[in-house]
Structures are given as structure tokens and as C-alpha cells.
Image (spheres, grey):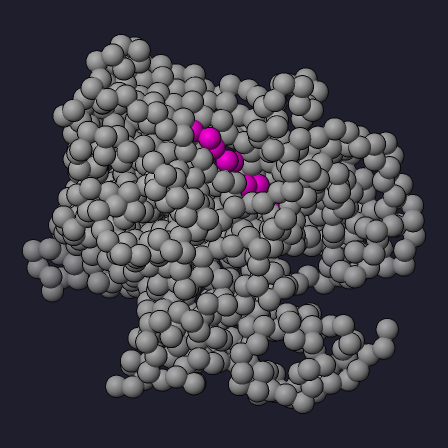
């Protein structure tokens, strides 16, 4: 199968990777670039667990072809913050009990980050709309909404 | 209660940052050297004889390392496993599946419960009828009870088949090290998986280790040993390499369980003052090729009624089998029973909450059995009603005006959640002052790691972050499955027991050093001190140095005295808005009051309640497995067509934990909480809809078409 060499800036690090035309961004992130913090929930764009930032814009990586990411910047959960130096939105998720099993969390945090970049003063309803493409099966959404709203309030004050 | 310093308060998840920064390894994130990808071939027929299986073409495909038949003579549902392959990569494994040649002889099949019950319907099992009685229980004389009643009412309620759909699908990795098998599994039951694997593979249980690290929940679908886990072990043995099998969302929909449907017909007699004189239930439940759920447990137990008769039947069909689903039977039975009680209350013009209070019990089996070890349902009623503003309800259902109508409803909840005696946990103290808590339980996502740390820290005068938690390994001391709301009331008391022993040992050591009696030593804030002279103290860390070696204290969750019934209770109060033009139900607010005894960690307990309510809202309004009756094909085997609630659908949810002391159940007085919040919510929503529009929607999911149809029928009447 024909392969293409593409260049991705993954969490600020430049990566070169051979991909086929069929491969999705999700597949190459997890299987070729070790970005296992990106989760595969459904593979069909239904659940949002695999969301990443592509040049700052949130996309479902399972619906994005690897080739489409050529020359672009990809930010995953670990790129937003790590254990030693977590991003305030990650702290807010822990503080507000917005994490239960944690599987959908990767996508939720990425979406929240993209959304708060656009809207620093969101209403609860706007947050609901922002995360409506991300399915959660155990925590429910209310604490996730609390986490995002409080993060916005705190960064304002 | 001032008994505790950390237990019962807000503690953040000790693994929270690991999860939110993507450092928590889920099954599919585990990568082993040389690991192969396994896939399972599944039957496309709802019922067929397997005449022959030819694996040769698949075996000869380059990149394929092993192909095995899974020894089936017959397939009874679409998705039934037939064969398995292991290959170097996923694409090759998928290609290999297509090269396996199976000759099927299709047989007559039946996929709907209605048709399965008909005379002459195709049999699902050769030697069993399609309909089997699974419960027949009586007390008193129902006919007499109906005669004594002022009002006799009969109503039928129906619940749809739901699919668990945990965020992370099922998956296992198997690896052999000589005669030893190591399995990483996304499971709610490491010990069950270990014992099952040992039995099937014919090796000693001690030669199998099952490890569960982080997992994306299970809701009951990950309670047992799975075919894909056994297949991975067999393929790994044959190839000498680790094998991973993860299921797709479609496989998750087809063959790893569902919540059985129910068709419940209630008949009851009630006096004008609200006294229940007779209750009867006939239920038909459908769990595909497996048994359905008994739904009568709440009916048999929670309200006073001397005369009762329950008959339940399971109906087999050629569909994927059921598995326990977050409060199996209780969810369906509560939707029927609690909806029916509201209709009864309306018949006699009584406040539905008053009807429940009127028939309140302090003993189980409808006040005919033994006392409950504790029962805070009355407090749930009181606090829940106050918080929702119960007085605001329409005194007559459907009394409001306009095209959008508001209503209030409630429902009671009873469940098990007592915990398993014999659960073991160890506390290990090291001379450097560090502490391990070790237990062969599993954290399926609810925060068990944190609960264990909270209990140990509270008992040892430390902070939860000071404790190293070791769980999710079947080589650790035994703990039960994480199902039936058992984990916390099993594990927490065992950890408490071990921690108390460790604390006593440390106090004795400190007493010698400080030259006082052990009784006079306090252990808090990382310090052991003379209670009468706090200056006379030694730090935890300094004292443990004298241990010289690691020291283990064994804890056990002790038995419960006979003569009591051990249950959890709760009541949900709900406010809804119904659009009578579109049939849309909007849940506005839920107050969820629970008696789960002593709460270990309020932070995670709240998440548990909010999550349970959210799932309940989802199933009340949206969720149903849809099957094409003619072909047996699952129409919605994905997350797009199988609708679950999104952030646009969930209401404000207010959890309340009532203060209840239970001296009998265990040394912490703690009861389970995993399933309780999932139980009463659909009934409470149904009752709120009834209160809003004056017609009862007797079927879940309560979709707009059903609301409109019910409203239309009301107009006709």
C-alpha cells in the first residue's frame, strides 16, 4: 500500500510519520505516535472521546484522515497539561469531581479547552451545547459543566 | 457524626490527576512486546446449525499466526462466537475472519417476545420451552384482599431492552510465562475471571493472574468470564505471543449483555384511606438466549401488604443474552410498581407520597419478615419533598393550562448493597513510614482507590495521599465482584479492620516509647501522642522506623448478625415540563435522597448519584435496543442510533445523603451506592409526567410519540 511521509507538530514536538491514505488521525496517534491518551470510544464520530485540537480547533480524530493533519499542530490531552504541570481546566475537573471512570475525560478536557479559548464567560447552556457531542456514561454531565464553568469564573477573577 | 476525621467528607480522587492528564492506562493502552491482535468471527444467523468450519484458508494468509474454532455446534443469535484469529495487525486479522469458511444450516428462529410466546413458535432451546416460570411467590390471600378493597385497579407497564454501553468496550490481553498465564482484563470481577480461566484451561487457579488497571466502567456487562478472554488465552498459548482482543461498539451491542425487557401487569386493592389490601403481579421478561430479570423484589418487600401474589416468567428469543445491568430487575420493577402506586393514589384522591407513608414498613417482606438493620426511607421522603417543594405539585394530575405543562413526581427505592463477609484487605507498614493498602478488589471507575485511602488514612491519622493503594490484581487478598453495590460495604470495612490492627500495634509501640499505657495514646495528624500530655509525642514516621521490617496487618469484613434485613433505600423527586404539542419531556430538576448508611467520600458519592440519575434519565426517555423482527438484525448497534442522554438532556441534580446509623451491617455502618440512584428515577419521571398532563406513560422509553398518543387517547375518553 502506498504510504506518504507527513509532518505533524504533536504537543509542540515535530514528528515525521509514514501514513496510508486510509489511516485516520486517531489510528496514527495511538498506533504510530504513542499518543494513547487519545481514546477510541466508537470510531465513528458518535462519542467524542478521541477529540484533539488541530491547529487549535477541536476535531474528532477518528473522523480526520491522518493526511489532513499534515503540516499542522495537534494537541492532545497530555499536550494541554501533565501531572507535574496540569492545566487549570484539568485541576478544575479533579476539584469538581468531574471524573469517574475517566474514559470520556480525554475528549471532554480537549473540548473544554477549545471552547474556553473562544468563550471566557460562558453560560451553563453554552457549556451544555459545547460538550453535547461528547458522550459520558458514568459521571453524568453536571459535574463536568460545573468544572468548566468554575474554571471560567476563576480565570476571570 | 463526629466519629471520623476524613470519612464522610469531601476527598478529591487520589488518581484524579493521573486520569485528567492521560496517564491512567486503560486496557487498550497496554502495549506488550510482540503482541498480536485477536478478532472473533461471529454468526450472521439468528439460529443455525454449524455444519462445518474450514480454517485452512485463513491460516494460510500471510501475517496470520493462529486460527481456532470455538467449538460450537449451534448458533442461537446473531453475534454468537464461532471462531477466533490472531494476526500481526488488525487489518490482517479482519481479512482472516473473511477467509474462514463456515457452512451454516439455517433453522427457524424467533426474535420477538410476543411471537416467542405463541403456540408453535420456533424453539430457542431444543429441550426447554420458550416460556419458563422463574418465580411464584404468595403471602396471605389476594382474592380476599381484593374483596376487602374499596378500589381494585389493574394496569400494565412495559420496559424496553437497554444495552450497557460502557464508555470503554470490553477487552482482554493474555500472555503466557511458561505455565503461568497473565491476563489484563477490563473486568468487574478479577477473581471470577481467574477461576473461570483456570477451570476452562485446566490449570491451577494459582497459575493465573488477572490484572485490571483503569477501566471505562461496565454496569454489569463486565461481571463474568468472557469468550474473548478465553480466546485470547488460547491464541496466546498457540502462538507463544501475547494476544489482545478488544470488542467493537457493534460487538458490545450484540453479544455482551443487555437489560431484559419486562411486561408487568399489576392488580391491587386499596381502601379509601390508602391501606393496601392486595397486590399481584404477572411479569413476562425477555433476556434473549439467557434468562430475564425477576422484577418483583421491590413489590415483595418495601410496602405493607398482607396479601400478595407474584408470578414471573422468562421468555427466550434468538437474541444476544442478558447480563446483570445496574440494579437488574429492581429498575424495571420499580418503574412498574411506583407508577402503579401513583395511579392507585389518584383513584382514591390521595397524595401519592402519603400513600407510600401510609404503607411504610420497618420489617422486610411487607412488614411480615425481620427488621431492617436500618431504614432511612422516611428521612429521604421528608428531605426530598422539602427540597423539591412537593406542595407545588398539581393536586389533580394534568390540572395545568397551556401547551407546556409542569408536574412533580416521586418514587421510592429499595435495593441490596450489604457487602460480602470474608472480604480481605492488608495494611502494610514500612520502616520508612510509608503505608500500602492492598486488596484484590477492582476500581471500575467509582473511586474505590480513593475510598480505601480515605478509610486507612482516617484510621491511621494520615492523609489519603500518604497511602499507596494496590488493587486490581487477583494475587491480592480476596474481594468480591464489583457488582450488586458490594464493593464499598465489602472493602471499606476490611480496610478499616486492618487499619485498626495496624493502629493498635503502633499505639502499643508508642506507649512503650512514651512510657504510658496504650489506651492513652492518640493517633492523629501523623503523630502518636499521650492524650494526657500532648507534648509527650512521637511522629508516625519516626515510630515506624522501629518496625525494622515491613509489617502486614490482615483485615477482614466480618459477618452480619442474623435476624435483620440489610438494604439500601432512597427516594427521588422530579420536576418535569411536557410540551403537549411535540410530546417532548424535559426533566428540569431531580432531588435524589439516599440512605446508603455512612458515606465514605461525599465527593465520589455525589458523582455516583448524579451519574446514576443521568443514566436513569437516559433510559427513561431515550434508550432502547431496536431489532428487525423479520431478520433478527440489530438496527441500532452503535452510539448514533442507540440514543443516550447528552449534556443537552440532563437536569439539575441535587444529591442528599440522609444521616442513618447502622450498627449491625459492618464496622463502618456503610452500605452500597452504585445501583440505588439508578433505580427510582424513571418511575419518578413517569409520575411527574402524569402529574403534568394527567395521563400515565406506562412504557419506557417515554418517547414523544408515546406522549402524544397517550394525550390523544385522553381526549377521546
Image-quadrant location for residue B377 = top left
Residue A21 magenta: no
Residue B329 seen from this side: yes
Residue B257 magenta: yes
- Residue B33 on image: x %, y %: 72, 63
Q: Is residue A122 above or below residue B142?
A: below
Work out which quarter of the rendered image holds the C terminus of chain B and state it.
top left
Q: Is residue B27 above or below residue B593?
A: below
Q: Is residue B625 above or below residue B267?
A: below
Q: Residue at x 92, y 49 (%)?
A: B57
Q: Residue at x 63, y 88 (%)?
A: A72
- Residue B13 on image: x %, y %: 37, 62
Left/right placement of residue A67 relative to residue B305 reads right
- Residue B231 on image: x %, y %: 72, 44
Residue B416 seen from this side: no
Q: Is residue B405 above or below residue B497?
A: below
Nearer to me, B231 or B83: B83
Left/right placement of residue B38 relative to residue B278 reads right
Q: Residue at x 54, y 66 (%)?
A: A49
Image-quadrant location for residue B541 = bottom left
- How many numbered marks does the figure carry? 0
Nearer to me, B324 or B187: B324
Looking at the rendering, the stretch of residues picked out in magenta corresponds to B254-264
Looking at the image, the residue that sits furthest to the front is B716
Left/right placement of residue B93 relative to residue B294 reads right
Q: Residue at x 69, y 24 (%)?
A: B122
Image-quadrant location for residue A19 = bottom right
Amino acid at each position: 500500500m502506498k504510504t506518504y511521509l507527513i509532518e505533524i507538530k504533536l504537543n509542540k514536538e515535530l514528528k515525521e510519520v509514514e501514513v496510508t491514505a486510509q489511516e485516520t488521525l486517531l489510528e496514527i496517534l495511538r498506533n504510530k505516535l504513542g499518543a494513547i491518551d487519545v481514546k477510541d470510544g466508537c470510531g465513528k464520530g458518535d462519542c467524542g472521546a478521541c477529540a484533539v485540537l488541530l491547529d487549535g480547533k477541536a476535531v474528532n480524530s477518528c473522523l480526520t484522515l491522518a493526511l489532513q493533519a499534515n503540516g499542522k499542530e495537534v494537541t492532545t490531552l497530555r499536550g494541554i497539561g501533565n501531572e507535574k504541570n496540569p492545566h487549570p481546566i484539568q485541576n478544575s475537573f479533579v476539584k469538581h469531581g468531574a471524573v469517574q471512570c475517566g474514559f470520556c475525560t480525554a475528549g471532554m478536557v480537549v473540548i473544554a479547552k477549545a471552547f474556553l479559548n473562544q468563550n471566557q464567560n460562558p453560560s451553563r447552556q453554552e457549556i451544555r451545547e459545547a460538550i453535547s457531542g461528547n458522550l459520558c456514561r458514568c459521571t453524568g454531565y453536571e459535574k463536568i459543566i460545573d468544572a468548566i464553568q468554575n474554571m471560567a469564573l476563576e480565570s476571570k477573577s | 457524626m463526629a466519629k471520623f476525621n476524613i470519612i464522610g467528607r469531601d476527598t478529591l480522587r487520589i488518581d484524579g490527576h493521573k486520569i485528567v492528564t492521560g496517564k491512567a492506562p486503560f486496557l487498550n493502552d497496554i502495549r506488550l512486546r510482540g503482541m498480536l491482535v485477536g478478532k472473533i468471527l461471529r454468526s450472521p444467523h439468528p439460529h443455525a446449525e454449524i455444519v462445518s468450519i474450514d480454517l485452512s484458508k485463513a491460516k494460510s494468509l500471510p501475517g496470520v499466526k493462529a486460527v481456532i474454532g470455538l467449538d460450537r455446534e449451534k448458533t442461537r443469535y446473531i453475534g454468537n462466537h464461532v471462531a477466533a484469529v490472531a494476526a500481526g495487525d488488525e487489518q490482517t486479522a479482519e481479512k482472516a475472519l473473511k477467509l474462514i469458511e463456515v457452512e451454516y444450516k439455517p433453522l427457524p428462529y424467533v426474535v420477538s417476545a410476543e411471537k416467542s410466546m405463541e403456540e408453535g413458535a420456533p424453539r430457542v432451546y431444543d429441550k426447554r420451552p420458550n416460556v419458563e416460570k422463574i418465580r411464584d411467590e404468595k403471602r396471605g390471600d389476594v382474592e380476599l384482599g381484593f374483596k376487602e378493597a374499596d378500589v381494585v385497579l389493574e394496569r400494565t407497564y412495559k420496559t424496553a431492552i437497554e444495552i450497557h454501553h460502557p464508555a470503554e468496550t470490553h477487552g482482554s490481553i493474555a500472555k503466557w510465562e511458561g505455565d503461568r498465564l497473565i491476563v489484563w482484563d477490563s473486568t468487574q470481577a478479577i477473581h471470577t475471571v481467574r477461576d473461570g480461566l483456570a477451570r476452562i484451561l485446566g490449570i491451577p487457579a494459582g497459575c493465573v493472574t488477572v490484572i485490571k488497571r483503569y477501566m471505562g466502567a461496565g454496569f454489569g456487562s463486565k461481571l463474568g468470564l468472557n469468550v474473548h478472554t478465553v480466546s485470547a488465552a488460547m491464541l496466546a498459548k498457540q502462538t507463544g505471543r501475547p494476544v489482545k482482543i478488544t470488542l467493537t461498539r457493534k460487538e458490545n451491542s450484540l453479544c455482551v449483555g443487555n437489560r431484559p425487557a419486562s411486561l408487568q401487569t399489576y392488580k391491587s386493592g386499596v381502601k379509601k384511606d390508602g391501606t393496601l389490601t392486595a397486590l399481584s403481579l404477572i411479569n413476562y421478561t425477555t433476556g434473549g438466549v439467557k434468562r430475564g430479570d425477576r422484577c418483583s423484589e421491590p413489590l415483595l418487600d418495601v410496602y405493607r401488604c398482607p396479601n400478595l401474589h407474584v408470578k414471573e416468567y422468562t421468555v427466550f428469543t434468538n437474541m444476544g443474552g442478558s447480563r446483570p445491568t445496574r440494579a437488574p430487575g429492581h429498575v424495571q420493577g420499580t418503574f412498574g410498581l411506583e407508577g402503579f402506586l401513583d395511579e392507585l393514589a389518584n383513584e382514591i384522591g390521595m397524595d401519592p407520597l402519603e400513600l407510600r407513608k401510609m404503607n411504610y414498613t420497618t420489617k422486610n417482606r411487607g412488614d411480615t419478615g425481620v427488621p431492617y438493620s436500618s431504614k432511612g426511607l422516611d428521612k429521604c421522603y421528608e428531605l426530598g419533598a422539602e427540597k423539591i417543594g412537593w406542595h407545588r405539585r398539581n393536586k389533580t394530575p394534568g390540572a395545568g393550562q397551556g401547551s407546556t405543562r409542569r408536574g412533580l413526581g416521586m418514587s421510592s427505592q429499595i435495593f441490596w448493597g450489604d457487602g460480602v463477609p470474608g472480604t480481605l484487605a492488608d495494611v502494610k507498614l514500612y520502616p520508612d513510614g510509608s503505608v500500602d493498602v492492598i486488596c484484590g478488589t477492582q476500581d471500575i471507575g467509582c473511586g474505590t482507590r480513593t475510598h480505601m485511602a480515605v478509610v486507612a488514612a482516617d484510621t491511621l491519622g494520615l492523609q489519603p495521599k500518604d497511602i499507596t493503594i494496590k488493587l486490581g490484581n487477583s494475587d491480592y487478598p480476596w474481594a468480591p465482584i464489583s457488582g450488586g453495590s458490594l464493593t464499598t460495604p465489602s472493602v471499606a470495612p476490611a480496610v478499616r479492620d486492618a487499619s485498626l490492627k495496624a493502629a493498635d500495634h503502633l499505639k502499643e509501640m508508642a506507649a512503650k516509647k512514651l512510657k504510658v499505657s496504650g489506651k492513652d495514646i492518640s493517633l492523629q495528624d501523623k503523630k502518636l501522642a499521650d492524650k494526657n500530655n500532648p507534648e509527650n509525642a512521637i511522629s508516625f514516621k519516626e515510630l515506624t522506623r522501629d518496625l525494622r521490617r515491613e509489617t502486614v496487618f490482615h483485615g477482614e469484613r466480618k459477618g452480619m448478625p442474623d435476624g435483620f434485613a440489610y438494604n439500601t433505600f432512597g427516594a427521588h423527586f422530579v420536576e418535569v415540563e411536557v410540551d403537549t404539542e411535540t410530546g417532548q419531556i424535559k426533566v428540569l430538576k431531580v432531588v435524589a435522597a439516599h440512605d446508603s448508611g455512612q458515606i465514605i467520600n461525599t465527593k465520589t458519592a455525589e458523582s455516583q448519584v448524579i451519574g446514576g440519575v443521568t443514566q436513569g434519565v437516559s433510559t427513561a426517555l431515550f434508550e432502547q435496543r431496536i431489532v428487525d423482527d423479520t431478520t433478527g438484525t440489530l438496527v441500532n448497534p452503535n452510539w448514533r442510533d442507540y440514543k443516550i442522554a447528552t449534556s443537552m438532556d440532563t437536569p439539575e441534580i441535587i444529591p442528599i445523603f440522609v444521616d442513618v446509623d447502622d450498627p449491625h451491617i459492618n464496622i463502618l455502618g456503610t452500605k452500597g451506592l452504585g445501583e440505588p440512584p439508578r433505580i427510582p428515577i424513571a418511575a419518578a419521571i413517569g409520575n411527574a409526567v402524569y402529574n403534568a398532563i394527567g395521563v400515565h406513560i406506562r412504557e419506557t422509553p417515554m418517547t414523544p410519540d408515546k406522549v402524544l398518543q397517550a394525550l390523544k387517547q385522553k381526549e377521546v375518553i
